[in-house]
Amino acid sequence: MMKNTVLIIDDNTALCENTEEILQLAGYKTWIAPNGKEGLELALLHKPDLILCDIMMPVLDGYGVLRALRNNEETVNLPFVFMTAKADKTDFRKGMDLGADDYLTKPFTGDDLLGVVQARLNRSVLKNNGLLNTQMESSCCRGHDEYQNDLDFLTEHRTIKLLRKKDMLFMEGDSSSFLFFTMSGKIKVFKSNALGKEYIVHIYGAGDFLGYSSLLEDGLHRESAMAIENSEIALIPREDFCKLLYSNSDVAIRFVKLLSVRYSEAEDKLLKLAYSSARRRVADAILYLSRKYMEKGKSETFFKLRRENISSLSGITPESVSRNLTNFREEGLIEIMDGMIKVSNLKKMELLKD
């Protein structure tokens, strides 16, 4: 049985290598291109089963690649997925108008990547076998337009709450009246025990929704949320959110998937807290923060080093965090300078043994 082939086009070397590794482990054959021009050449040469492409690149951007492919009879139907960190909805709309099949918003998880890739490949098989007719295709396009318009309705023209670093968005036990959408900045969601010790559940960045689980349950926040840098948060009234869930199944499915991902992540964290060493847990916390702070187009990641946040993520004391950070620096895994941390070798850190 032949392997499905995937072409990855992105000028971020680290992202390309990580994406390639995940896809190869899942059984896909891959090619990598560092810019749009080389990517287009590889696409025309190999005719891959699917293309993952960045938008902003040197030489030829993602829009140019997609436009060229859609104007070529041999590649007009190649499944094409944009990978982008850009949150501006005009970029999403422009891509769909040019004929993109889907989007992956950076940073994405391995599950996000494999889910989109497999879904697009399955759809391509159905289409090539004649199981998707023109009427069905146009219906799906209308469905996507409706879905995108509804997401626009959720996030546009909303009251914006400005938070300074360390400002609270909500407290555990507060009544939930809004769905929150992160326009910019970063928000940590955490739980505290009776002694005030924090455990960070998740960190949300630009383009993320939060607060939906409390709206879907009993209306009370089960965690607290605090800005860890200056942030802008759009406030979406509970009534608008619930009305949209009942009227658009695609939007409802998206939030069900978000809940599923969050619960899976929580289970993984519990497993690591129970069985991983302090060394492994600190490494995982650093990798998590590194991905959250990864900047577009850069293979190196810098972020502000706060022992307290690493301690809250890993579930160990700040003193133990400091010891492990010192060890990682001596081993050449990280660099620490002026309160900033840089992961020198992401792959080596990921494969770190206890």
Image (cartoon, rainbow, N blue to C red):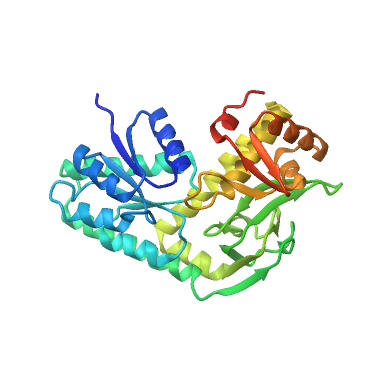
Measuring 30% from the left and 44% from the top, which residue is drawn there? Answer: 51
Quadrant of the image occupied by residue 184: bottom right
On the question of residue 274 being in view, the answer is: yes
Measuring 72% from the left and 43% from the top, which residue is drawn there? Answer: 310
User: Which residue, as the protein is rendered here, is positioned at the far right?
Assistant: 195
Horizontal side, residue 44 vs residue 329: left or right: left
Horizontal side, residue 332 vs residue 28: left or right: right
Quadrant of the image occupied by residue 151: bottom left
Give 341 or 338, whichever is nearer the viewer. Answer: 338
Horizontal side, residue 255 vs residue 75: left or right: right
Image position, residue 4 (x, y; %): 28, 33
Give 134 or 201, whichever is nearer the viewer. Answer: 201
Q: Taking 327 as reference, is 118 above or below it?
A: below
Image position, residue 248 (x, y; %): 41, 62
Quadrant of the image occupied by residue 214: bottom right
Image position, residue 149 (x, y; %): 39, 68
Give 84 or 188, whichever is nearer the viewer. Answer: 84
User: Which residue, as the protein is rendered here, is positioned at the far left?
Assistant: 73
Q: Quadrant of the N terminus?
A: top left
Give 266 or 300, whichever is nearer the viewer. Answer: 300
Image position, residue 316 (x, y; %): 77, 36
Q: Quadrant of the C terminus?
A: top right
Measuring 60% from the left and 44% from the top, which residue is drawn there? Answer: 290
Q: Taking 333 as reference, is 234 above or below it?
A: below
Measuring 22% from the left and 42% from the top, which residue is drawn there? Answer: 126
